[in-house]
């Protein structure tokens, strides 16, 4: 176990630190018209959903569901981009 092993251990500690930092961050996704906002923790857990009153239509619940889904996917994609090995 030479210097290669030590270097690998150091890289693992750095990666663990980066992931810990990522889990502390929040990522915000919006529906295309910004009527719905979804805030996720870096680990992907849901922190908050904000819905603007003007998009609440009792006759169009499906539309609201679509807006929430869209905002959630956007926030999830931001997290994925941060954790991708190909992110800058």
Image (cartoon, grey):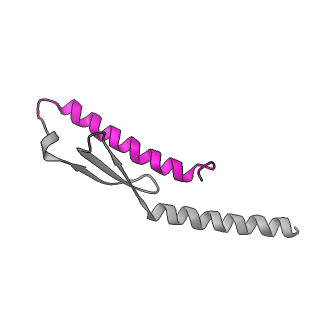
> Residue 36 occupies which quadrant of the picture?
top left
Inspect the magenta stretch and tell me whether residue 68 lies in it. yes
Range drawn in magenta: 58-87
- The residue at 26%/36% (across/down) is 65
Residue 38 lies, in percent from the top left, at 32, 49
Vertical arrangement, residue 63 with respect to residue 21, above or below: above
- The residue at 18%/47% (across/down) is 52
Which residue is the extreme one toward the right? 2
Inspect the magenta stretch and tell me whether residue 64 lies in it. yes
Residue 1 lies, in percent from the top left, at 87, 67
- The residue at 60%/53% (across/down) is 88
> Residue 19 occupies which quadrant of the picture?
bottom right
Residue 84 lies, in percent from the top left, at 58, 49
> How many labels were placed on the picture?
0
Vertical arrangement, residue 50 with respect to residue 21, above or below: above
Magenta-colored segment: predominant secondary structure:
helix
Residue 17 lies, in percent from the top left, at 58, 68
Horizontally, residue 66 falls left or right of residue 58, namely right
């Amino acid at each position: 176990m030479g210097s290669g092993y030590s270097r690998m251990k150091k890289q693992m500690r750095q990666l663990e630190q980066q992931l810990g930092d990522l889990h502390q961050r929040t990522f915000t996704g919006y529906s295309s018209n910004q009527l719905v906002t979804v805030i996720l923790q870096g680990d992907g857990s849901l922190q908050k959903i904000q819905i603007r009153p003007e998009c609440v239509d009792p006759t169009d619940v499906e539309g609201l569901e679509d807006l929430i889904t869209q905002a959630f996917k956007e926030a999830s994609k931001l997290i994925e981009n941060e954790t991708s090995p190909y992110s800058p």
